[in-house]
Image: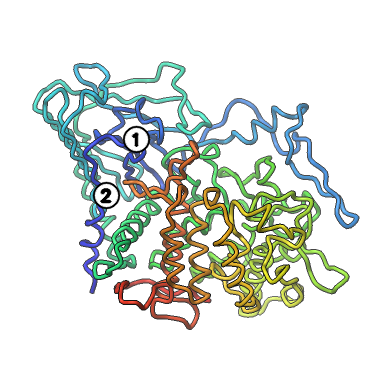
Amino acid sequence: MIDKKKVVRRHNPKLNKINIESPLTIGNGEFAFTADITGLQTLYDEYTVLPLCTMSQQGWDSYPGSYTLENVKKTVYEYNGKKFEYAVERFDETGEAYDWLRQNPHRLNLKRIRLLWDGEKIHSGDISEIEQELDLYTGILYSNFKLHGHAVSVQTVCSQTTNEIAYSITCSENRLSVQIDHPKSSHKKSASNWDILPNEQTAALRSPFFEDVFNDSIRGWKDFWQNTGIVDFSNAKDPRAFELERRMVLSMYLTAVNCAGSLPPAETGLTCNSWYGKFHLEMHIIHAGWFPLWGQSKCLEKSFGWYEKILNNAKENAARNGFVGARWPKMVGPEGIDCPSRIATLLIWQQPHILYMLKLTGLTEQYWDIVKETADFMCDFVTLGEDGRYHLTPPLIPAQEEHNPGDVFDPAFELCYWRFGLEIAVETAKTLGEECSRWFDVLNNLAEPPVINGLYQAHANCPDTFKSFNRDHPSMLFGYGFIPNPLIDRQIMNATVDKVLSCWDWKTAWGWDFALTAMTLTRLGRPGDAIDMLLFDTEKNSYVASGNNFQRGRDDLPLYLPGNGSLLFALAMMLAGYGDTRDKPGFPKDGLWDVEFEGISPLPY
């Protein structure tokens, strides 16, 4: 039996100097607090890479104004005698509405809590002899340092049952105080507007409810770790094993803090604002799909009620262009209204996500209304061609967002995912005795992913996939790995993977691309390549001291939680297997990867 506490604690983040890339975050899925080296947000102005925020699932704001998508001039597309209108381009005459809808609602920074010395602001040069450690097993952040030569000790903690943080501060000199500032909101990365003098107050050095929060954090995190799957890499001889274990443990912690709440997570979670703090539904399963595979279904299930809440909005979203069923939006706030965008309103690969997530948690029958409306849209969205096959036709944008929406025809990954999603829907309908003949017809007559010169392409109108579009997401690989597809030709997929590995511009890939490519390599029986891809050394696959998947080269993504979540999703498959395949199929049998795991379920397919 694995000593979970030992595995977790050997990766406690420890800092002995200021690291503006890696402030440490405490939280509970609904509420989070990001601290600097003092355990609070004392050096707020100096943390310019990853801002120090206090954020919650309930903390949203909007600028003055009131617009809807009806106030935005639409871009008109035509295909097969039909007209479609989407809020894609920003036209001058409706530019104000376009911008307002993108920026609102936005998450806000609730407050800043910082130390003062003799009532004055503290700077990094005033601090020395830093020893900071986040105890992952209890969620307690310990910060010890000297301030102007005097010893200071701070403990910071977040409740696991309420939206409260607490702190306890000791100092050899009675010259410290705590100031709490309340900013106005901003749609920018910091979620803060400090142009107006904030509401300030001086607080005591120990929260009155500190002991209660302290004990609640210990109980909550112990329960999480003891009921979550784990992997012990300590016997592995490959020199990369320790780093893989570090990424695993810290990714589990970070996604539990940021991605396990009542709303789908933003790509930077509750740590700072990305895309105005809105969440991207095509990333939901990438963030949080790992939870049920590692024994924490409840962390994903919390958000399913939100899909029910916005179901009518999703149906209206489909109806705007004459489709039935529910068309799930991409970039949204709590109300579930899609944003005008050159990408958001045309993206489609988020549609089957909810079906997959419900299947992973065993809740497809309980959420039959969502299954039905999702499948109805998916079947209405396809076009029956003269060949008797159903096709995905323009205008649309695939997961690889580099393509002109008017040109995209039968994108490879989306076709595979459409098939997989409809298989889940048909299976659920048959179990419940519900009518599904239309779904069954589309499923059985769906077009196959396009092949040109013995390689799967991005889409059927993209013969130069590997020359002109060898960047961003290599999504033509993801229809066989992240999901199963018995109709995929393994020889062709192997050749396609080899082509991608030889020509792709990996600097332009995103953090989750490496994990999903590793899943494809695993299903192809190439475990050595899968490990190499999971730990591929490139800018977007870097994990800083805090465990954040930093997307280097992008100022707006100092952390990228889809990278963390996808790593764990891939590890479940690589360790526990998939379908009838077991025995660590994603790890080489070369004696270098002697790893032990428990509490992890295989992918059901």
Residue 217 visible in the shown view: no
Q: Nearer the viewer, mark 1 or mark 2?
A: 1
Residue at horizontal 40%, vertical 53%? 255
Residue 598 in the figure: left or right of residue 101: left
Residue 192 % position (x, y): 45, 28
Residue 379 visible in the shown view: yes
Residue at horizontal 74%, vertical 49%? 404
Query: Are there few (<14), some (14-19), or many (20+) residues within 10 Å of tag 2?
Result: many
Q: Quadrant of residue 485?
A: bottom right
Q: Say which mark, if any, is on residue 517.
A: none
Structural distance between the alpha carbons of marks 1 and 2: 21 Å
Residue 289 % position (x, y): 48, 62
Q: Nearer the viewer, residue 447 or 472?
A: 472
Furthest toward the right, the residue is 81
Q: Earlier in the sequence, mark 1 or mark 2?
A: 1
Residue 424 % position (x, y): 61, 73
Q: Looking at the image, is 35 positioned above or below residue 404?
A: above
Looking at the rendered structure, the kind of residue marked 1 is Ile
Q: Are marks 1 and 2 in contact (CB under 8 Å)?
A: no
Q: Say which mark, if any, is on residue 20.
A: 1
Q: Looking at the image, is 380 positioned above or below residue 582?
A: above
Residue at horizontal 39%, vertical 76%? 584
Residue holding disc 2: 139
Mark 1 secondary-structure assignment? loop
Query: Are there few (<14), some (14-19), or many (20+) residues within 10 Å of tag 1?
Result: some
Furthest toward the bottom, the residue is 580
Residue 464 in the figure: left or right of residue 137: right
Q: Quadrant of residue 293?
A: bottom left
Mark 2 secondary-structure assignment? loop
Furthest toward the left, the residue is 172
Q: Quadrant of residue 141?
A: top left
Residue 106 % position (x, y): 54, 35
